[in-house]
Image: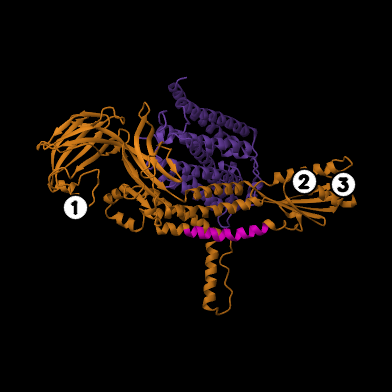
Amino acid sequence: MTVLDRPAVSAPGPSAPRRGVGLLLRWWRRLTAMRTAIVLLFLLALAAVPGSLLPQRSLSQTNVRGYFADHPTLAPLLDRLYLFDVFSSPWFAAVYLLLFISLIGCVLPRALEHARALRAAPPPVPRNLLRLPDSGELPSTLPAGQALDVVEEELRVRRFRVVRSEGELSAEKGHLKETGNLLFHLSLVALLLGLAGGKLWGYEGSILVTEGQGFCNSFQQYDTWSAGPLVDSGDLRPLCVDLDDFRAEYEENLTAASFTADIRYGAPGEDGRPTTIGVNGPLRVDGDRVYVTGHGFSPTFSVTRPDGTAITDVAVPFLPTDQSTMASEGALKLPDLGSDSDDQLALEGFFAPTGLVQGGILTSVDPRPLAPQVAVVVYQGYLGLDSGIPQSVYSLDATQIDRGRLERVAAENLAVGESLTLPDGTTVAFTGYREFAALQYSHDPGQAWVLGSAVALLAGLLGMLLLRRERVFARVASGPGGGGTVLTLASLTRGSGESAPRFAALTDDLRTALAARTRAPEPGGPPA
Amino acid sequence: MTPDSLAALSDGLFSVAVALYSLAVVAFCAQLAFGRRPVRSAELVGAGAPAPAAEAPAEDTRGRRWGAVAMGLTVLAAAAHGAVLVTRGLATDRLPWGNMYEFATATVFVAVVAFVIVGFRAPGLRHIGLFVLAPVVLALVLIGLFLYAEAGPLVAALRSSWLAIHVSTAIIGFGIFFVSGIASVLYLVRSRYEARMADGGAPSTGVLARLPAAAALDRVAHRTAVFGFPIWTFAVIAGAIWAEAAWGRFWGWDPKETWAFIAWVVYAAYLHARTTAGWRGRPAAWVNVVGLAVMIFNLLFVNMVSTGLHSYAGLN
């Protein structure tokens, strides 16, 4: 802790550069003062708060869009303050970078000092030992030198480093406490570096894969992906994953018990090694991981035109809107089925793994596919896929419907095997379902480094909080009246409130040891 | 016993524990009310100076007897409380902290155990029993009313050995911080009283005079926080390791993660503040109280209001 605001007593007109240096130095001292560190810690805690109260882009783009829709005037203002990207915002970075600079400025000098202290001898014996918080006197009949020998032996057994000089001794142990302290703080820096490395060189891609399909690790294939600025998109690990089978198992009360995916993985073109991944059990390949992050159903449809052209068993993933019943929604778009761009076909649907129709409305009552049904609405017309405006693959472009370019031609609830016929004679059949898994590919080169830092951090923390630094001093003098000697003992402890009982125990042990060494079996009770 | 009857037994024991804790609260009240402290105002006036080690406030036999009864009831209630968790675990054949009801019940249990340990190691600190157990009873009643969830199997994501490591340490850390926070609150109250006494104020005849000395409260708050901090750190790290296996990243600023981080930073600030000039004493104690508030917020708000990946509350 640095002394703050020392009154600047300087020559009347210090040169500008020197004044600048002085100012910098003062700011540096202020920044690295413990008081500043505490304030910065508070700021860091405070800065993280909006990140949990407002929707964050890093967690859910959908929620952020929803917030914009609900608060059209407030949201852009908040956005300008980075409140939807708190943890990557410049002000959040400013707080933690200042904190880390403060930390480094505090810890580095301490580390140097500690390195010196490790090699230095214990400090000399203070002049007046009885002034120290824990001190006392022990009489002995041993000669001065032998009495000190006993003390030295006892302290060495307790792993103190002992320095003897004429008639006195100082001992020290517990440097590991400060080592732990430094390790803890430096590990924090290492952890931050690991995090930064992971953000710069890491990437992540997500994709929905229906049973029987697969993907290869490239950004073109992923539904969504994010990558650090230093990721070379041409340099991703060549790995392909095929999903053979997905299983969701449920308890009697329909609590999800397990999700497992049987996959094959390997380099492109390879046959692929089979394995099973699931919740809490990702595939790990040389530090990269493939996770199952979700699942759902892909109903399959067959569409047959009156002229005989047909598409059979096309599977479209429907997104679950309710995890407890796996009711799902999605869309099938067939732009190339008809003769021209105004003869496209599409359907929007609702899928129920176990359907229940009441008053014509289909609902789902069970997440298991016991009686799958779909409610479909079929449209014909222009889908607007080539209009240049990106659209979701899970729903139709509502503006085309509003403009009347996409026309609703049929709606029906279908069980597996049932079909409906459109006015123009096209049949749409619900042929069954397959399951899909939401898979995520993650690459984070900083991860192992972060884990190592976290372990070091914890070790340092334990050392710092549980160990004690103790110093013990002793001095001998001849006893009053020339009979025997008097040992004056004192100890100085850092890091523990209750040093008195330990000092008493040490004194007792020394007394016993002194008595044992004394040839005449005279217990060293305190004389008058 | 069948799982159903075990679950019913667990629920019954919950009521028994609440009843016994309430009796303990009454006994602690009696200890404070009847345990008349011999008037030793000289010592009180001097309390502004660095106080000696935690000494038991001298009190007459009646107060001591009530104190012993209160501690006995607390231990008995804690046994019933522990049995709530054990029978829950047996009924469901898993660790009994798979939803918010079980998590909160276990946390309160750890807080009581931490208090009992403190109370046996430093009998003078038993006087804070009322202020620990009254919130305990309140918390348990609220847990029973609002967080109760039927005994049931774990959701898939929680079926991992990390549940035993991450959630257990989070519970232990939280329980210890709970006692630490209460000690700091009492320290704030008592130190103001002592400051008033040092200024020549009249000694209180009420509860204030019977609280342990401010220095002792501050020490127990710090000790418990020092004990809890590495446990909490470990809980967060273990959570990150689990998240890496379960969610595809070790840290993603999920609301629960964010608030765990905030709590960690606040407790780090507390430990620094306590050794920093200008922050020692009352300001540091306030930081500790803020830490407890953050922990409780993390439990209640994050599970009940915000939606994140830690949504295992079993509420709906």
Which chain is painted in orange? A
Magenta part mainly helix, strand or loop?
helix
> Label 2: which residue?
A154
Q: Label 2 lies in what chain? A: A
The amino acid at mark 1 is Ser
> Badge 3 is on which residue?
A141
- The span shown in magenta is A97-117
**Quick one: SS at disc 1?**
loop
Residue A422 appears in the figure:
yes
The answer to which of marks 2 and 1 sits earlier in the sequence is 2
**Colour used to depict chain B in the structure image:** purple
Q: Label 2's element?
A: helix
Asked which secondary structure carries label 3, the reply is loop
Q: Chain of mark 1?
A: A
Q: What residue is drawn where x is 37% and y is 39%?
A: A271
Q: CA distance from mark 3 to mark 2?
A: 18 Å
| Residue at the far left in the pictured view | A424
Q: Position of residue A368 (x, y in %)?
A: 31, 30
* Structural crowding at the residue carrying mark 2, measured as other residues with C-alpha within 10 Å and reported as few (<14), some (14–19) or many (≥20): some
Mark with earlier residue (3, 2): 3
Which residue is tagged 1? Answer: A387
Q: A283 or B182: which is nearer to us?
A: A283
Label ID, residue A110: none
Q: Is residue A159 left or right of residue B127?
A: right
The alpha-carbon separation of the residues under discs 2 and 1 comes to: 88 Å
Q: Residues within 10 Å of mark 3 (few under 14, many from 20)?
A: many
Distance (Cα) linking label 3 and label 1: 105 Å
